[in-house]
Amino acid sequence: MVCRLYVAAHAVTGDFEQVPASAAGTVPLDDETHDLLLRYFQADYAVGTGLVRIAVTRGWDTEDRLITGVTAMTPRELVSEILASTTLEPKDQTATAKLVEQGLTEPDARRSAASKIARRNSFSRADVENALAEPERVHAELTHLLSKCHLGAAGEQAAAERLANLAEAVSELISVESRERTLLKVTGGWTVKDDADPVVLVPTEALGSFVLPRLLDDGRMLVAFGPLRDRDRPLTLADAAEIARALGNEQRLAILRHISEEPANGQTLARALGLTGATVHYHTSLLRSLGLITSARDAHSIVHSLDSHHLLTATAAIANAVLGEDSVTVATST
């Protein structure tokens, strides 16, 4: 449900190319719901997406349990968990939790704490400061939004069955291939440093090409992602058109060029190319969803690498869409 709200918010604003406009129809958009949806879910690291981690940590596997669970939390508890939920290193999460407590208890330190929390988590500073100042309002608004967007018994049962099928498919893949290969295949480009890394895979029908990483309390990394995608299947005409659109952007081409020479994290790319961190994150998310890059957690950051073979395969597919089938082929690497 939380993932559905996240995707609907992007559909409303039209700011992410890979989100179909029809996704906005998955939530009732009266004026109040529209405003709350954008307030809590319109950005990759919007405050509301912290609910993904909370739901997994607490075992809220249905919409009813999510709504009941959030309602039962105290406002301070809800705000504390949400604001400390997106860092990907345990020591960063501990430091963020201390900043959140300071912001909730010391009004004079709130602005400074909000700024540091936002910087650590890529939140909007204003969103963090408002949450610290008015946790009761945040609790009431999120509870109202979740209740308003509840699918109902029939819809929830159907969604649960589809998610169970996705989870079973992921488990079968892991049993046949390594978890690292499975993660690469199902998320469109996320990898782990090795199979020993503690990762929880959470398939969700709503996310499509998006991937939401979060750190759990026990140090495991949660990776929520959309429907399974087979990177090895032949590219269709629609795939070629989508990749051609993605490549028709100077900033994305600059990112691909940079990481073709050496893998780089988001901060390095932003600094080298003169872009904001949010812009780099958006572009790398899109490139990863199309299989043109892969992303792996390395110490304190996520490092992006070019999948040169997939890039060559994609550009060959674009050429073949124009010149005719099999006009251009890509040699298999050995």
Image (cartoon, rainbow, N blue to C red):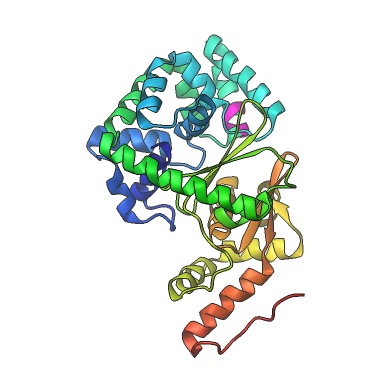
Q: Quadrant of residue 299?
A: top right
Q: Position of residue 315 (x, y in %)?
A: 58, 76
Please give the count of numbered marks on the rendered protein.
0
Q: Is residue 152 visible?
A: no
Image-quadrant location for residue 61: top left
Q: Which of these two is toward me, 203 or 209?
A: 203
Q: Is residue 92 above or below residue 265?
A: above
Residue at 74% across / 57% down in the picture? 263
Q: Identify the main secondary structure in magenta.
A: helix
Frontmost residue, 313 versus 34: 313
Q: Is residue 90 magenta?
A: no
Q: Position of residue 137 (x, y in %)?
A: 37, 19
In this rendering, would 182 be left or right of 320?
A: right
Q: Which portion, as a residue range, is magenta?
A: 116-120
Quarter-of-image position of residue 214: top right
Q: Is residue 276 visible?
A: yes
168, above or below 252, in the image: above
Q: Is residue 30 above or below residue 140?
A: below
Q: Residue furthest left?
A: 30
The residue at the point 53 percent across, 83 percent down is 319
127 or 6: nearer the eye? 6
Position of the N terminus by quadrant: top left
Residue 104: image x %, image y %? 53, 14
Judge left or right: residue 15 versus residue 156: right
Residue at figure coordinates x 50%, y 87% from the top left: 325
Residue at position x 70%, y 42% from top? 301
Q: In the picture shown, does residue 252 fall above or below 183?
A: below
Horizontal side of 202 relative to 65 (left or right) equals right
Give percent across and percent down for residue 164: 44, 43
